[in-house]
């Protein structure tokens, strides 16, 4: 099914009641060239790029629930490429460039909206840090503007500028950043991968690996039977350690819970994405009008896709400190997702010590924006057996080599990244 | 999630700081780089019951060893673990 103005007109004639499924709910075949574990954004994007760019179409994506039931469908949809360190900076900009052409590439409306991401600063030291970050971005050809308080006031006059403890002194703005519709990203990649022959298999949990005498992975055991594979790529986010353990691997990863919140609907208020620099609070407004916001992770290991009250309170306090006008707004929904927090806060995209098994993990709370580039570079690795030029530093052994990519400089304490 | 501190009674989890899995033990000075790498970076990342270290900074300032289920958040036991947070070297 290809979407176009003509398909829309045709469907309108029958009252939009006869739209076909946008991707097939496939039955597992006995064997694939590549099996991807995990039907989140990264798994589906990988399958799409394998088929679209590397000519490998005998591919299955195995998802234990329904596609998008993990973090892909739980995040706050912020996309940006305002990173500081070599390794991250080029990778996230590659991702931003792919976001900018995603809808044409996938033939799907993913509602990419470059409404701008504004990081506020509240002290001279923080301004200096943002100036440095902005300069690093500009040296790498990425847009960044350092705004003073007057310029921020023009954009968002309702903020609490004169807060006695944390006055707003300005902000770092990336105009090309913004949001995208997370579910549509999942469906868009499923649609585009399916059109190129990829099998998307739901309710299919991988329970172990099959291996030959030499230890090479030859396939997976699943709740829907044994499936053979030339290569297996895992993209299971918060479940990375559990799946890796099936191949006797221990990872530099802890699973933690991050919560997100949506308020009742409001008229248009917040022009883009804003982050409060003195606490941890970030907010945007959905097209339906709800404020979508979040803050810190809960801070303890968790596989329960829900968090606790103290963080809710803390996040709401951050919101109140930044924009007291939300004081009487009611919270509509709240949920949690399990994130693969790596030991330096950066991802891992690499071969593993187990032959035939490849890993895509460690996305922490920032992997949504990475979805397109992650899919592309992981597909490259699976197809060519060597890292993509923009992903050479995301190696699994970097911790052993002392080549960490620690944006926050927090060290090996995942709940601080 | 409330943690029943043996000294202070049940308190909300924001009074406590989290160190993590209680299992990794700092290797001795001659243990070699691989042992240090494992200690600092690799985790079992248990899904289920795990013994972990919490510090009651908002209360009695004791280190505690908490057995907690990471899948349900159920807390199974809380015991004093004096000195657990100090980076003691195992002999
Ligand atoms: C509350 C919240 C807010 C966030 N906000 C942002 C944001 O604003 N911007 C941003 O860039 N990032 C954000 N993130 C992070 C981002 O959502 C994740 O990093 C990213 O979605 C992870 O990649 P994924 O989409 O492939 O993961 P997932 O969607 O979690 O996909 C992994 C899939 O693997 C499946 N799986 C697991 N085990 C197995 C198995 N054994 N067999 C088969 N399938 C299995 C799971 O069911 C799941 O569907 C946020 C995360 C959360 C939780
Ligand atoms: Zn106490």
Image (cartoon, coloured by chain):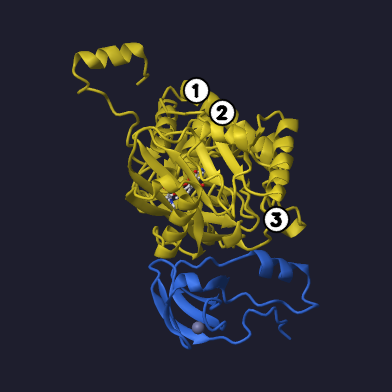
Chain colours: A yellow, B blue
Q: Which residue is mark 2?
A: A98
Q: Position of residue B15 (x, y in %)?
A: 49, 73
Q: Residue at x 57, y 61 (%)?
A: A415
Cβ atoms under marks 1 and 2 closer than 8 Å: yes
Up/down of A96 relative to A42, above or below: above
Is residue A47 left or right of A5 when viewed as pictured? right
Q: Is residue A88 visible?
A: yes
Q: Which residue is mark 3?
A: A409
Say if labels 1 and 3 share a chain: yes
SS of the residue at dot 3?
Answer: loop
Is residue A89 left or right of A314 when viewed as pictured? right
| Nearer the observer, A340 or A60 | A340
Q: Position of residue A29 (x, y in %)?
A: 39, 40
Say if labels 1 and 2 share a chain: yes
Cβ atoms under marks 1 and 3 closer than 8 Å: no
Q: Position of residue A234 (x, y in %)?
A: 52, 48
């Amino acid at each position: 099914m290809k979407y176009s103005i003509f398909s829309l007109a045709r469907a309108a004639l029958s009252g939009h009641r006869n739209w076909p499924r946008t991707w097939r709910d496939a039955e597992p075949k006995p064997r694939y060239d590549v099996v991807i574990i995990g039907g989140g954004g990264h798994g589906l994007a990988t399958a799409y790029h394998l088929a679209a760019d590397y000519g490998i179409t005998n591919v299955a994506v195995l998802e234990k629930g329904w596609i998008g039931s993990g973090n892909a469908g739980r995040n706050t949809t912020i996309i940006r490429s305002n990173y500081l360190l070599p390794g991250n900076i080029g990778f996230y900009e590659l991702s931003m460039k792919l976001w900018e052409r995603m809808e044409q590439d996938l033939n799907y409306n993913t509602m990419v909206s470059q409404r701008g991401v504004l990081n506020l600063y509240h002290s001279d030291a923080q301004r200096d840090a943002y100036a440095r970050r902005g300069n690093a971005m500009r040296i790498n050809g990425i847009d960044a503007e350092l705004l003073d308080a007057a310029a921020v006031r023009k954009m968002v006059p309702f903020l609490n500028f004169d807060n006695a403890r944390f006055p707003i002194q300005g902000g770092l703005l990336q105009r090309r950043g913004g949001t995208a519709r997370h579910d549509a990203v999942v469906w868009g990649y499923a649609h585009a991968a399916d059109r190129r022959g990829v099998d998307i298999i739901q309710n299919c949990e991988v329970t172990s690996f099959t291996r030959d005498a030499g230890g090479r992975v030859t396939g997976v055991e699943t709740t829907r039977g044994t499936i053979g594979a030339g290569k297996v790529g895992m993209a299971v986010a918060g479940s990375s350690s559990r799946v890796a353990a099936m191949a006797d691997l221990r990872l530099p990863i802890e699973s933690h819970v991050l919560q997100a919140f949506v308020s009742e609907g409001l008229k248009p208020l917040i022009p883009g994405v804003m982050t409060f620099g003195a606490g941890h609070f970030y907010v945007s407004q959905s097209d339906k009008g709800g404020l979508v916001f979040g803050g810190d992770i809960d801070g303890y290991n968790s596989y329960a896709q829900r968090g606790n009250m103290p963080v809710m309170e803390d996040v709401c306090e951050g919101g109140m400190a930044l924009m007291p006008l939300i004081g009487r707004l009611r919270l509509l929904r709240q949920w949690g997702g399990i994130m693969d927090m790596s030991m330096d806060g950066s991802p891992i995209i690499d071969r593993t010590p187990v032959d035939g098994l490849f890993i895509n993990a460690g996305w922490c709370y920032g992997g949504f924006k990475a979805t397109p580039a992650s899919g592309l570079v992981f597909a490259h690795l699976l197809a060519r057996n060597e890292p993509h030029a923009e992903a050479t530093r995301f190696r699994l052994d970097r911790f052993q080599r002392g080549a960490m990519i620690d944006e926050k400089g927090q060290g090996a304490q995942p709940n601080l990244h | 999630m409330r943690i029943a501190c043996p000294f202070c009674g049940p308190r909300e989890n924001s009074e406590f700081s989290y160190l993590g899995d209680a299992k990794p033990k700092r290797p001795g000075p001659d243990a070699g780089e691989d042992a240090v790498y494992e200690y600092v970076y690799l985790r079992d990342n248990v899904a289920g019951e795990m013994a972990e270290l919490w510090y009651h900074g908002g209360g009695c300032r004791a280190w505690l060893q908490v057995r907690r289920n990471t899948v349900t958040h159920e807390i199974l036991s809380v015991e004093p673990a004096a000195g657990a947070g100090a980076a003691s070297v195992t002999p």
